[in-house]
């Protein structure tokens, strides 16, 4: 297996303009998928498309916001045929490590919109296609913040826990349609997410730093992409509703 796991398949990847999503898009295209690469960041998407084209892969790009229903529709409509074989919900934002007492409604709504509502809308839009095809896979990217309260602020941790719930519910309710839904929980990964992760409340960040001391290593984006690609492939046919950590042992 390996090289041809995605031959003839169509994959929709959000957050494809940077970090983990970019690595997922490049890897899937390298394994034969037609990738619909989606992101807010047009420059990042151009870089992704260039990397895919240089490697001989196929992709289209959609500049759009997973929070906007019309943009979600455009992302799904950008597929080349009737099928979407894999949906990888990777786009996400952090919350500047804000504890609940320092959290305003705008930040809460934004983090929940990007990290939970967007993935829900994308699942809702692609599942009819997957049910019609009798097959499909969804891989959501949560975080170890979906399993512990110890790595980010309240909004991020809440959103990443909710994404695990979305994944498990989908796994149960659509298994009989041939659709698998799984979630990956990375630990620290070297990406650009730091732009949304500036500590804004010193006392809260100091408390969180006690747990950061347990960090074992920082992963490269492609280490997470390798797991996403496996979960989305037929090799993982018996894996549904799994919450898979890739954190170098942080949560061990
Ligand atoms: N980097 C880490 O340490 C780490 C750890 C655990 C989980 N994660 C998760 O991995 C995922 C990918 O993050 P990353 O580390 O690659 O970060 P990144 O910032 O490098 O990439 C995230 C991408 O998502 C895009 N994005 C943000 N909001 C969007 C929106 N509303 N609509 C469309 N695109 C949007 C950004 O433009 C960016 O290109 C996120 O869900 C993040 O929570 C990251």
Image (spheres, helix red, strand yellow):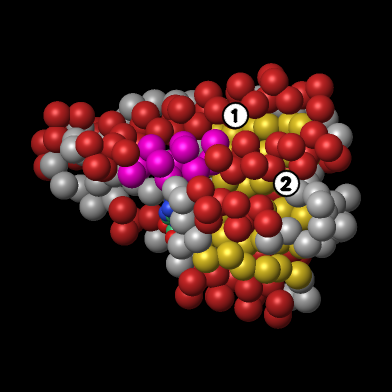
Main SS of the magenta segment?
Answer: helix
Question: Which residue is at the far front?
Answer: 70
Q: Can residue 250 be seen in this view?
A: no
Identify the residue position indicated by label 1 in the image. Answer: 167
Would you place residue 233 above or below residue 81 in this image? above
Residue found at x 67% / y 39%: 138
Q: Can residue 149 be seen in this view?
A: yes
Question: Within the image, what quadrant is residue 137 found in?
Answer: top right
Residue found at x 47% / y 38%: 117
Residue 59 locus on image (x, y percent): 70, 68
Residue 193 locus on image (x, y percent): 38, 55
In the picture, measured across the screen, residue 166 lies left or right of residue 193, that is: right
Where disc 1 sits, the SS reads helix
In this picture, which residue range is highlighted in magenta?
Answer: 110-120
Residue found at x 71% / y 37%: 127
Residue 86: mark: 2
In the picture, measured across the screen, residue 183 lies left or right of residue 130, that is: left
Disc 1 versus disc 2: distance between alpha carbons? 14 Å
Please name whichever residue, 20 or 170, is drawn nearer the observer in this view of the structure: 170
In the picture, measured across the screen, residue 102 lies left or right of residue 167, that is: left
Residue found at x 86% / y 34%: 134
Would you place residue 123 above or below residue 60 in this image? above
């Amino acid at each position: 297996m390996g090289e041809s796991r995605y031959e003839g398949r169509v994959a929709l990847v959000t957050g494809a303009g940077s970090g983990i999503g970019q690595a997922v898009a490049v890897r899937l295209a390298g394994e034969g998928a037609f990738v619909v690469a989606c992101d807010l960041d047009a420059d990042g998407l151009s870089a992704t498309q260039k990397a895919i084209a240089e490697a001989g892969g196929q992709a289209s790009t959609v500049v759009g916001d997973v929070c906007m229903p019309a943009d979600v529709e455009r992302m799904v409509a950008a597929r080349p045929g009737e099928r979407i074989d894999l949906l990888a919900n990777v786009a996400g934002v952090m919350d500047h490590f804000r504890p609940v007492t320092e959290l305003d409604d705008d930040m809460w709504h934004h983090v929940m919109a990007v990290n939970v509502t967007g993935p829900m809308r994308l699942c809702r839009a692609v599942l009819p296609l997957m049910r019609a095809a009798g097959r499909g896979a969804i891989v959501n990217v949560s975080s170890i913040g979906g399993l512990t309260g110890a790595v980010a602020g309240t909004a991020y941790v809440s959103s990443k826990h909710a994404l695990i719930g979305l994944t498990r519910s989908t796994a149960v309710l659509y298994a009989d349609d041939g659709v698998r839904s799984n979630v990956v929980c990375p630990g620290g990964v070297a990406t650009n997410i730091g732009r949304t992760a500036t500590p804004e409340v010193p006392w809260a960040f100091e408390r969180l730093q006690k747990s950061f001391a347990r960090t074992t290593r920082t992963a490269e984006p492609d280490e997470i992409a390798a797991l996403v690609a496996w979960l989305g492939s037929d090799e993982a046919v018996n894996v549904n509703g799994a919450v898979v950590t890739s954190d170098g042992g942080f949560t061990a």
